[in-house]
Image: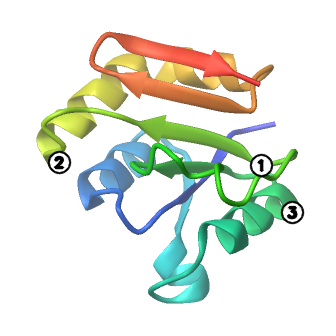
Amino acid sequence: MAVRFLLDENVPSSVIELLKKKGFQVRTVREVFGPGSSNGRIAEEASHSGEVVITLDSDFLELHPNPKAKILVIDVHPAIPSAIRQVLESHLARCIQLLDSARKVKLTQTGPTSST
């Protein structure tokens, strides 16, 4: 089954463009809920729809843990759109591979790491 993504409000449009260019199905939190949606609501939607949440929020699941939601946290500094896009493009395949067995993947400039 193809990976589908739900992008948090803090993810730059350059990431949306990259994922669509690579043929992925992408929805944004703004499209689904409008502005200002809670992390818990986003995680709930992703767990029901089977999408992977992409966010820049490193504590996304801390306040609202959801055992079924899969999360890709992009932790790139400086958090400028071009740097975020470049790091994701370089490591996207490995992130997807890790998400097959992990619930949460954290992506930094040096690459992705997973946690359950």
SS state under label 1: loop
Tell us which disc is closer to us: 2 or 1.
Answer: 1
Q: How many circles with numbers are drawn on the protein?
A: 3
Of 25 and 112, the residue lying toward us: 112
Q: How far apart are marks 2 and 3 (CA)?
A: 29 Å
Labels 2 & 3 near each other (Cβ < 8 A): no
Q: Quadrant of residue 26?
A: bottom right
- For image coordinates 58% across by 27% down, the residue present is 105
The residue that mark 1 highlights is 69
Is 23 located above or below residue 60 in the figure? Answer: above
Q: Which residue lies furthest to the top in this view?
A: 110
Labels 2 & 1 near each other (Cβ < 8 A): no
The residue that mark 3 highlights is 48
The residue that mark 2 highlights is 81
Compare marks 2 and 3 and give the one earlier in the sequence.
Answer: 3
Is 17 located above or below residue 19 in the figure? Answer: below
Is 96 located above or below residue 36 in the figure? Answer: above
- For image coordinates 77% across by 52% down, the residue present is 65
Residue 47: x percent and y percent?
82, 56
Q: Which amino acid does label 2 sit on?
A: Pro
Residue 2: x percent and y percent?
72, 38
Residue 4: x percent and y percent?
65, 49
Q: Which amino acid does label 3 sit on?
A: His
Q: How far apart are marks 3 and 1 (CA)?
A: 8 Å
Q: How far apart are marks 2 and 1 (CA)?
A: 25 Å
Labels 3 & 1 near each other (Cβ < 8 A): no
SS state under label 2: helix
Compare marks 3 and 1 and give the one earlier in the sequence.
Answer: 3
- Quadrant placement of the C terminus: top right
Q: Which amino acid does label 1 sit on?
A: Ala
